[in-house]
Image (spheres, rainbow, N blue to C red):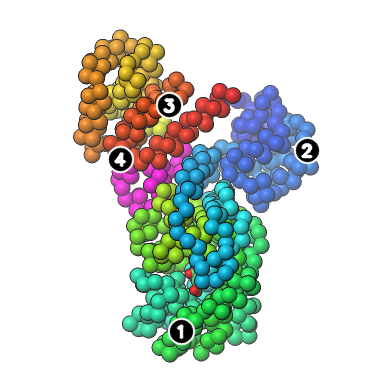
Amino acid sequence: MVVDADQDYGIDARMGVLFDAVASHGFTSRQTIMARIAEGGIDPDDYRIAGSRAKLDAWGDAPIGPRDFESLLADEILTISRIFRRQLIVPDWQDFCRAITLIYEGVAADRSGANADYIPILRDADPEKWGVAICSVDGQRFCLGDVDVYHSIQSVSKPLTYAFALLREGEAYTSRFVGTEPSGRPFNALDLLPDMRPFNPCVNAGAIMTAGIVASGSPEKSAFDITHDLMALWQGLSGSIAEVRYSHETMLSEKATAHNNYAISYLLQGRKGLPRDVDLHKMIELYLSCCSIEMTCSMLSVAAATLANGGVCPLTGQQVLPTEIVKKTLSVMQVAGMYDNAGVFTLQVGLPAKSGVAGAILVVVPNLMGFATFSPRLDDYGNSVRGVSFFRDLVERFTFHVYDSLSGGRTGCKLDPRESQHNRKQRDLSDLKWALSHGDRHARNVCELLLQVMMDISLADGDVEDPELRVISQNLDEMIGAQVSVQQLQSLSLERQAEGANSFDALLRRLADDCPNLDDNVRGLVLDAAFRVACADGMVEPEEYERLAAIAGTLGIHRGILDIQVDRFRRLHAVKAT
Ligand code: GLU
């Protein structure tokens, strides 16, 4: 609807459009405005809307007219406008969160693996805890499950201690003492590079040496005071959404069981020598106390988002780390963040990550968002079982793998949350319509596929009735502007019915043959066409779902992507029905 807001409301047209987004009958309310902001994934306490929030709170529950709307929100209208017009980095935030929920729930059933047991506090942690937290580079947040449980960050501290060393001592000095090569060896191995440096800052030897570099730069400070400097860094990275804590209990246990880490420290001292001859005990104390820093999953997700955002915290706007240092930190996480399974993780997930033995994993999707998961049961490599499964499932559904962009249209229709799915489909369809109007050969083939797929979904229950043919005819018109009458469809349906079950098999064979020539957009459209017919009566029957799954499978589209679509449909339908 185009509103002549100047005339109607006495405010400029653009402001009028924003007002319309939340108004009915010429008024809106504080609740409606805040609900719209929350829908976009933005916390009511976000600093970017703090002024408007305060004004709205002072305004209370009275109705808000257009001019009030303007005066209440004008100070932060740029941000409000981006939220209301779905221009944040993930436009359909609610859809994305729903898809995340499905993955989270799917992974929850996995009870394999075991808690780390080398110290009581980890051994006795509740193994059932399971949390996932997300923060986008635009500060959109979503949390599920046990995201507020404090736990020691353990090895998750390592890349940030490295970042701190780079910040304080520079790259040249830091790299004199610690390498950046993957080790392929267990994290606590006593192995070194041929030049006697530890492999990288994420294995214990490298992290201990990094602690030594940091400690050597502040001779006047105790290890505990330096730990506080690192805690301040974590506080900034996590946007101070909660307090970074320190666990003395963890530290005492770590110290009592640190024989291997002492062995590593003496080896480092004996081979390479320690930076500025720093005291070995101070070095190891700093290393262990960094492991004993405590944070929550939701805090770690914001820290991950800060890294994804080049060092600027999305929740505070503060540049916490220089972008150059973030680049190096992420590179080290990419090659060595997941213990000696880092290579497989890179292959499967393709994102910089760091895990810790308390069960946390922090994953960065550069320029898009940060993730953190928490679940204490670990696999043989020391990585959280559920966490790893979550990220594998995530990347099967979304184009997050660093090389998904290589695919030239063959990612298996993975979703890209950066793009509104609705806009993407509209654009694909309008391209196809246009090409079809010029008789494009490829477009005609697509048109035929759409028709056959729709017909075979209708045939899932054995026959096709007239209302179903009308749905097909309407959808063909709507999707690609093809005019196919119900009569024409009737004869086609009789032909296909005569073939019985073979007709669907023949369709799958055709799809399989054509598949190599269909790009992701077309594959998505074919599944979408099938989906539209399956849903036309308001529900997806089991036989229809089976056929949809077979079509998706033949087109190389992951079942999880179909399930996200079915779930979205069910939700929207349930909303309409109420
Ligand atoms: N604190 C453990 C240790 O130094 C390492 C922790 C971890 O790998 O997460 O042995």
Secondary structure type for disc 4? loop
Q: Please tell me which of labels 2 and 1 falls first in the chain.
A: 2
Closer to the N terminus: mark 1 or mark 4? 1
Front: mark 2 or 1: 1
- Residue 506 in view, yes or no: yes
Mark number, residue 263? 1
Check disc 3 and report its element: helix, strand or loop.
loop
Cα–Cα span, label 2 and label 4 = 53 Å
Q: Which residue is mark 2?
A: 60
Residue 568 is situated, as x and y percent measured from the top left of the image, at: 48, 33
Q: Nearer the viewer, mark 4 or mark 3?
A: 3
> To which residue does mark 4 refer?
556
Q: Point out the stretch of residues depicted in magenta.
A: 395-423
The answer to whether 31 appears left or right of 259 in the picture is right
Q: Secondary structure at mark 1?
A: helix
Q: Residue placed at 47% from the left, 22% from the top?
A: 538
- The answer to which image quadrant residue 457 occupies is top left
**Which of 92/227 is in front?**
227
Q: Label 2 vs label 3: CA separation?
A: 44 Å
| Quadrant in which the N terminus appears | top right
Badge 2 crowding class, 10 Å Cα cut-off, few under 14, some 14 to 19, many 20 or more, is few
- Seen in the picture, residue 481 relative to 162 is either above or below; the reply is above
Disc 3 to disc 1, C-alpha distance: 62 Å
Asked if residue 411 is among those painted magenta in the image, a careful observer would answer yes
Mark toward the viewer: 2 or 3: 3
Asked if marks 3 and 1 touch (Cβ < 8 Å), the reply is no
Q: Is residue 549 inside the magenta stretch? A: no
Q: Which mark is residue 116?
A: none
Mark drawn on residue 540 = 3
- Marks 1 and 4, Cα distance to the nearest angstrom? 51 Å
Say which residue appears at 23% left-offset and 35% top-offset: 512
Q: CA distance from mark 2 to mark 1?
A: 64 Å
